[in-house]
Image (cartoon, rainbow, N blue to C red):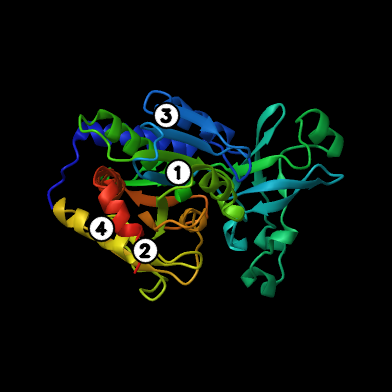
Amino acid sequence: MPDSISPQTHSRQRQLLEELSNAFGPTGHEGPVRAIVRREMDSLADFVETDGIGSLIARIGDESDDVPRVMLSGHMDEVGLMVRQITAEGYLTIQPLGGWLDQALINQRWVVMTRNGPIPGLTGIKTPHVMQPDARTQVFKKESMFIDVGASNKEDAEQRLGIRPGDPIAPDSRFQEMAGGELYIGKAWDDRAGVAGLIEVARALRESADPLPATVYLVATVQEEVGLRGAHTSSFHVMPDIGINLESGVAGDYPGITKDEAQEELGKGPTVFLHDSSMLPNLRLRDFFVDTAAALEMPLQFNVLSGYGEDGAEMQKAGSGAPSINIAVPTRYLHSHNGVIHRDDFANAVRLVTEVVRRLTPETVSALTTFD
């Protein structure tokens, strides 16, 4: 399929993805990401508010009982760490925020956000020169890890650097284009790709001259990585008739992963999740996405996962329930310092979700939400 995305659109989306990927926002500490979303949504939405735990809810269209309520979500938080204790020597012990593999934590750069500002740090690792031979092949456990922030002792870490227990920690990793310009390296694609998608869908809906058949709520949620907490509260605030979650997908196109584990690939289109540990999609809504993608002559992928949890599950369970689906941008190397996405998968996910929303008329939603 020829590239139908203009160079100007690619450039704008790249800048947005870069800014969101670089932003600091571990679970429970999403403020810098929320500021970006609010800045963008203030000019695109008719109304913007936050709920009681910090999820940002932007509305396009008037609230009315005569049209469906369509909720789109993407979570702002990234996997990170928290300062557990400061040792007498000035090192930090850590509490993971979200699902990290122990081997992804060691010998990495971090940013500790303190009351005095950001402090760089490093998860230290013993030099192999002094290790016993059997220790060199072992996986280091997170319980034994520490972050070196360059403090001389505990008092120095507390007084000079301003570090306190509970301070959030995020990976220190910056956005970069890979050779060729179509693949983007960055941290936090889970789920800054989805958050960028919310903003781009809002832009497309606002720029369209066609009236919307529904009231659209674009929700940037908090604390997804520790139990879908922001989606829970915001879903009960919105009470959607239809739920569409924008997420990072689990790519299965690199060595060491099998098609039984994950089926999507970079560059082959956005993905519909058919199964994860938190939700089964409404199949009529799935078919609606498939038919819309076909009308757009757009590639579409499917993924069946044994694990994973995502915000669509909370939209599905809100109130009396809502047909919901998870639409993903395929991503390599999730929950680590660096992931990889394809710009066309992102752009096509935006196009697909935008077109689906434009087609969710009251009659269509009634057909999706009525069961024999």
Instruction: Inspect the image, locate mark 3, and give the three-letter code of the amino acid beneath it.
Output: Met
First along the sequence among labels 2 and 1: 1
Circle 2 packing at 10 Å, graded few (<14), some (14-19), many (20+), is: some
Give the Cα separation between the discs numbered 3 and 2: 29 Å
Which mark identifies residue 342? none
Q: Closer to the camera, 302 or 161?
A: 302
Screen quadrant of the C terminus? bottom left
Quarter of the view holding residue 284: bottom left
Q: Which residue is mark 2?
A: 282
Viewer-nearest of discs 1 and 3: 3
Circle 3 packing at 10 Å, graded few (<14), some (14-19), many (20+), is: many
- Residue 140, compared with residue 168, is above or below; it is below
Q: Element type at marker 1?
A: helix
Residue 137 % position (x, y): 62, 71
Give the Cα separation between the discs numbered 4 and 3: 27 Å
Residue 240 % position (x, y): 44, 48
First along the sequence among labels 1 and 4: 1
Q: Residue furthest left?
A: 2
Q: Is residue 258 left or right of residue 143?
A: left
Instruction: Inspect the image, locate mark 2, and give the three-letter code of the amino acid beneath it.
Output: Asn
First along the sequence among labels 1 and 3: 3
Q: Which residue is mark 3?
A: 41
Q: Is residue 3 left or right of residue 76?
A: left
At x 48% / y 40%, what residue is drawn? 220
Give the Cα separation between the discs numbered 1 and 3: 15 Å
